[in-house]
Every structure is written in C-alpha cells, then in structure tokens.
Amino acid sequence: MIEIIILSIIQGITEFIPVSSSLHLVIFSEMFYKTSLNNLNLLVFTSMHLGSLIAVILFIFYDSKLEIIKVPFKRLIELMFFGTLPSVLVGFYFYDFVGENLTINNLIIFSTFFFGVLLFFADRFAQNTKNIKHLKFIDLLFIGIFQCFSLIPGASRSATTIISSRFLGIDRKNSIIISTLLSFPVITGAFVLTIYKSDIQQFNYIHLSQQVIPSIFFSFISSYIALKIFFKYSSINGFKSFAIYRVLLALFLLFK
C-alpha cells in the first residue's frame, strides 16, 4: 500500500512537468524497492494515469479556463487531433518496445540528457511571438510528429510538446497549455490501450480498495497541485531549471 501511494504521488508530480514521469517511477522502483517497474500491477499503473487524467480535466476547464475560452473551439479540436494522431499511430506499434525498456539503461539516460539540452536551448532562444490562435496546420503537425519522441523512455511527453512549441516561437504560457491539452487524448488513449491489453479478469474487490482507489486518488491530488504550481512558475521563469535538472539527473544515473 505504501509503495503504491508513493509511486502514485511521484507519477502525479512528474506527469506534467518536462522531466519524464516513467523515468522517476523506474528510479524509485529499482533504487529503493530493488524491483522493475514492469512488475507493478498493470491495473495500478493505469489507475495512476487515470488520476492524472482527472486532474487535466479539472485544470483545463477550471484553472486555465480564461485562456482556453480565448481560443476558437475548432482550433482546439484541430490541435488535439493533429497534435496527437502521429504519436497514437506510432505508439500503437511501439507499445511493447516502450514497456520492455522501462528500466535504467543507456537509452533512458541518453534521452534524459539529450532532451534536457534541447529543452534548454528551445526555451533560451524562443521568440515568444505566437499563441495557440496563431498556429497553422504545419505547426500542429510539427508538434504532433515531435511528440512521437516521447515514446522513447526518458524523453517525456511534456518535454517534447513544450520543446516543439517553443521552437515554433510559442510563448511559455501557451506552450504549457498546449502540452496539457495534448495530454488529454494521449493519457486517455494509453489508458484504453492498457486496459485492452491487460487481464481484466484479475480485477477484484481487493485490487479496488487497496490498490486502484489509492492510486487514482493520490495521483489526482499530486497531479493537480503540481500542474497548478508548474503553470504559475514556468509561465514566468521558463523551463531552464527543469532542463538543468534533467542533465544532472542523467549524469547521476550514468556514474552512479
């Protein structure tokens, strides 16, 4: 129970900031519990993402409502469709590859370092001249294609969407909103796909009361709080601190 609560909190805190939630779950599982993340009950892992999904819905329609209503509804649909379609198509075929590489290895260390450097330069040299309303079709497609890199363990979905948005000159606040909006269909799709591939017959009352409900609850609370703080902090201060953190973390994992 304690392990599930801690993992759910870690998942919630790191899901929407550009540091890779899966990486931190792997680190905690392997370094503190001496076990692979693959050994975690699939239903529990899915429940953590469900908690984050609920937090996204609350944040989009409550906390960032004033920003969202400024954007035409058609543009929001286009963003979520074209910004998500490439990663959904690619993710369907690389689902097993991602699961098999959820461990501390050279790939996850390299991607943590590489996308940390990209995040630093994307944020440092962005022009801050665009918002969601200024995005063209080619911009939406670019963000969607770039998000495919999030399937590389350690890359981070949040990092790839923010990096691509900043490269396009989108300001920090709108980059976070874009990343949050795109998380909705991605997390939903991952949730449905995981349920489809899991053995749902193993589900019972014990799983519900001792694993699933705590996973959803603590993931939701930590996701919502982290998202609010991240939005307020990074809209003003940018993403430099997260980029540096990624680089230092990669070096730590490399030489530990």
Image (cartoon, rainbow, N blue to C red):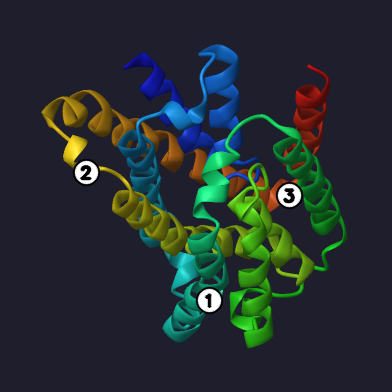
Q: Is residue 20 above or below residue 133?
A: above
Query: Tag 1, which secondary structure?
Result: helix
- Say few, some or many: other residues with alpha carbon within 10 Å of mark 1 (under 14 / 14 to 19 / 20 or more): many
Total count of labels: 3
Q: Is there any visible trace of residue 231 in the rendered image?
A: yes
Disc assigned to residue 200: 2
Q: Position of residue 207 (x, y in %)?
A: 20, 29
Q: Which-is-in-front pick, marks 1 and 2?
A: 2
Identity of the residue furthest to the left in this view? 205
Q: Position of residue 168 (x, y in %)?
A: 75, 72
Q: Secondary structure at mark 2?
A: helix
Q: Amino acid at mark 3?
A: Gly
User: N-terminal of the two: label 1 or label 3?
Assistant: 1
Q: Quadrant of the N terminus?
A: top left
In terms of depth relative to the viewer, which is nearer, 108 or 174?
108
Look at label 2 and name its amino acid: Ile
Decide if residue 60 is on the left or right side of residue 207: right
Tell me which numbered mark, 1 or 2, is placed earlier along the sequence. 1
From the top left corner, tell me how far across and down residue 135 is, in percent.
64, 81
Residue 229 visible in the displayed image: no
Q: Where does label 1 land, which residue? A: 79
Q: Amino acid at mark 1?
A: Leu
Q: Residues within 10 Å of mark 2 (few under 14, many from 20)?
A: few
Relative image position of residue 160 (x, y in whole percent) = 67, 57
Picture residue at 63% right of the left edge, 48% below the top: 156
Q: Which residue carries the number 3 mark? A: 238
